Image (spheres, rainbow, N blue to C red):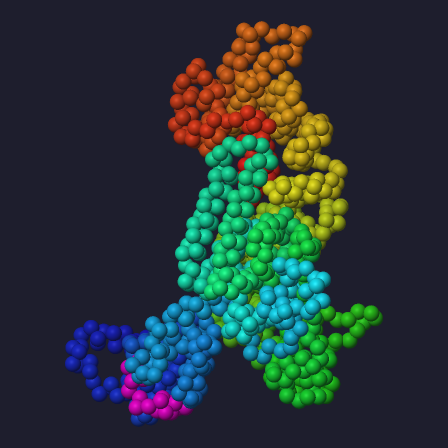
Amino acid sequence: MSNPDITATLLAKYKSKLTDSPQEAATDNDAQLWSYLQAAAVLHCFSPETLHPLETQYLHPQPRVLLYDSIVSISGGLSEGLFTLKPAVRNEALRRFPSRQAMLAALHANAVHVMTDVQQLWEMYLVTGRFPPTAQMGYRLLNCFCQLLGWLAGIDTTLPSQSDIMPLLHQKSVLASFEHLVISNFTGREKELRLLNEHIGNETPSLLKRLYAKRKPILAVHGPGGIGKSALVGRLLWENFQGRYRQRIPFAYLAFDQPNLRIETPFTILVEAAAQLALQLPELAPLFIRFNEVVRDYRTAQGGLKNRAEISGTRTIRLETYHSSEAKLYSEFAALLDIISRHNNAKKPVLLVLDTFEEVQYRDRESLSAFWRMLSAIQEEFPLFSVIIAGRAPIADLGISKDVFDELPLERLGAADSITLLKALGVQDDALAKAVAGQVGGNPLSLRLAANLITNDVSAAGRSGIKGLNTSKWLFFQLDEQIIQGQLYRRILDHIHDENVRKLAHPGMVLRITSPDVILQVLAPVCKIAIDDIYEAELLFDALKREHALVRMGESGALVYRPEIRQAMIRLLKQDKYAEVRELHRAAIAYYNRRDDMEARAEEMYHRLALGEDSPYELDRHWVKGIEQSIAANLEEYPDHVKVWLASRMDLEVPRSIYANADIMEWERNITRKVKRALMELQLTWALDLLHERQERSEQSPLFALEAKVYMLMEDNELAARVLEQGVEKVSGSANRGRLAELFWLQAQVALLQSAPALADERLEQAEQSIAGVANPIPLVQILCHRLLVYNIYLREINDNEPENKVDEQESARKVAATRGRLNDACERINADNAYTAPFIIEMAIPLLGDEYPQTRKRLEEFQPSGVTPSPDILTTENLRGLEEFRESWEEEEDNYTYESLA
């Protein structure tokens, strides 16, 4: 809230500036102003009211008014009253100091101040007169250094200029993606570091390994949250970049919590990897530009196939063409890596690190298939390609070949390393460190929590360790680390002095994010926090924001509870405050239901799923596309029946046993999704395994058509015909004419593949009768086009197959003419709303109308078809289009358009 007196004074000052002349504005107040400016100049950020001017006689009753023209608010710090000096003002203020020692004296006069990374580096300079060598600086520290060079421009002539540092800053910007992983008190893990360095070729494996162990391109590091996976990877990359090993390996670090990475479209990984490699090797810029052009060509080619810009041959050929464009892209990337490897005449590996793999590990194996295929294809062409994957769980069951990866499970730290880490974190007493290490185990996160608790409250620990911490066994069960961590977090929360702030975390951490409005509307009523208005909620919000161990600032300005803390706390909350947990879920649902932004949809859906009370129908009503990643982040909180529902709406892998007794419609929805993806990957055997998981089918099941397509791709037309016959029998009992027409359509294709054109025409006639009169003319146009194509190619053979009812040429001509007339009638119903849904069908219809219907042809040509002439193969390769009104909405989700174009 702004101070009314300050606001009035500022307005008066502004008005006086409009009326006073420059000479009148230059008063004796200059000395007072510069006394404050010099005090502020030695601080990165400050609150004007807390500044101590260099000379006490110059104290000002309202420093913010005095400094108004010289300061700007710090981003994110306005609510705390934090400001910084304008660059030119700061430089001038620092110039007025006679020496560095005078600057240091000004700093001592303002001893209580905010400590930032810039401030810490600045104070090091003021004390020593030196900065660390730039070669040893990371990207963040180098950024701070560049800022300080601006402060000291023209003052310390021994320092480089900002322009001198910019090339190095650009090169080190690759560190920005993982620098936060590098911790100063990294402890132990010598064995694991050695294994990682062996994997990337920076250490020589033992003779036994060289003789008997085949090198595998992927090393999967896995372990529970807090075990130190990211810290280990960060250490490896940092030491590699600093040149501490025998060779500096070019690398890219990608974390899957980045929204621009999509594992189902693996080329996004290559684009980001190439961008990071380009930062390390600016001299190879033309090669990276060329690769980006290849990516553009690839995307154009993929788009052409999906949009049916060309009518290819068979389904198999279309799928193989689709994958061959990917293979070309992967080959180009492998060639790029090979050039990078040989750069500077030293052939070396190139490393790709994929961190936070748990963000995508929940995906079903069909969604991960293209990703594994990409890594394998690159490694085949560039054998020195090394990949490190870091996640919480093993990758062995994710559809990857066991021949291409090794696993490195991260265990707890040993007793000695645990004690060393505790001492580095401030637990200096040897006996206490040993007792605590034995009490909480060797998980680094647990050790850090324990050290935090002890260093903030000495009375929390005794000779046997932390008091009151339950780590005992019950029968044969050991309390798991999350329960221990949850207890430690709760003890740490007890030391938050403001009880209301404490309640925001416990039980308030049931929510994933919070804001002043959420505090007022949701948390305060349930958690019994006595506040009356949004101003009081804002004060609580600001207090919670200062608890950096619990929350971080989100992109929308809300506070996000740290997932690693929340994951441990939520289990204890469910045990200790079961009723309040559920009440908070319900209150959050009601709150977010009143908002219509995407963040609100994700939060509302999370709380509905975690609560587990809604019916599938109710969940469907509230589900929206685009929130999948947010929902997947908390899978462990959802009950099994919710996971079954969720797996049919996003790429979620759940144990197949869960589906054994699931509702048939829910199972079919899930299987349809998975089989379509399997077919796009040409995983035909796996597709059949999925389809045969259960034998029963619903009356309008889409699985008959899917299974027939699998057999057709496998060129087993007899089994395809058998499945379609079963489907026709089952679906005929329903009112779904579109589903029936699709089965007749596929029967016609099988008949042609079995050299039975007369039977194919019968089936097409049945399909035509099934679909006649439907609102969308596209499927009827397509069927009639195919009948005419069959007549054009097979009419003589059809007539020869009916010796008892010999059809003369005139009757055949009348049959063709009648079919063409019905095609004209159907085409007259085509309009702009449906013409562009399947343009290749328009292209087929125009020549097949012949010369009898020039007006219809002319109208169709207005839709600007590309003039592609269909080949005979189209009779056995196309899906029947325009059946959306006969399908469930979920059949059209996600990659269905790609699937329809390809499989």
Q: For residue 574, say whether it is visible.
A: no
Residue at image location 55% in from the left, 43% down from the top: 324
Residue 59 point in image, percent of width and height: 32, 89
Q: Does the magenta run of residues contain 666? A: no
Q: How many marks?
A: 0
Near-viewer residue (813 or 175): 175
Near-viewer residue (149 or 618): 149
- On screen, 511 above or below 465? above
Left or right: where 483 falls relative to 880: right
Q: For residue 302, say whether it is visible.
A: yes
- Quadrant position of residue 131: bottom left
Residue 804 point in image, percent of width and height: 67, 7
Residue 660 point in image, percent of width and height: 75, 46
Main secondary structure along the magenta-highlighted residues = helix
Residue span colored magenta:
90-110
Residue at image location 76% in from the left, 46% down from the top: 661
Question: Residue farthest to the right?
Answer: 475
Left or right: where 513 falls relative to 758: left
Left or right: where 20 falls relative to 901: left
Residue 525 point in image, percent of width and height: 58, 66
Q: Does the magenta run of residues contain 96? A: yes
Q: Quadrant of the C terminus?
A: top right
Residue at image location 42% in from the left, 20% down from the top: 856
- On screen, 852 above or below 834? above
Q: Quadrant of the N terminus?
A: bottom left
- Quadrant position of residue 473: bottom right
- On screen, 698 above or below 348? above
Left or right: where 132 falls relative to 785: left
Residue at image location 49% in from the left, 55% down from the top: 336
- On screen, 228 above or below 703? below
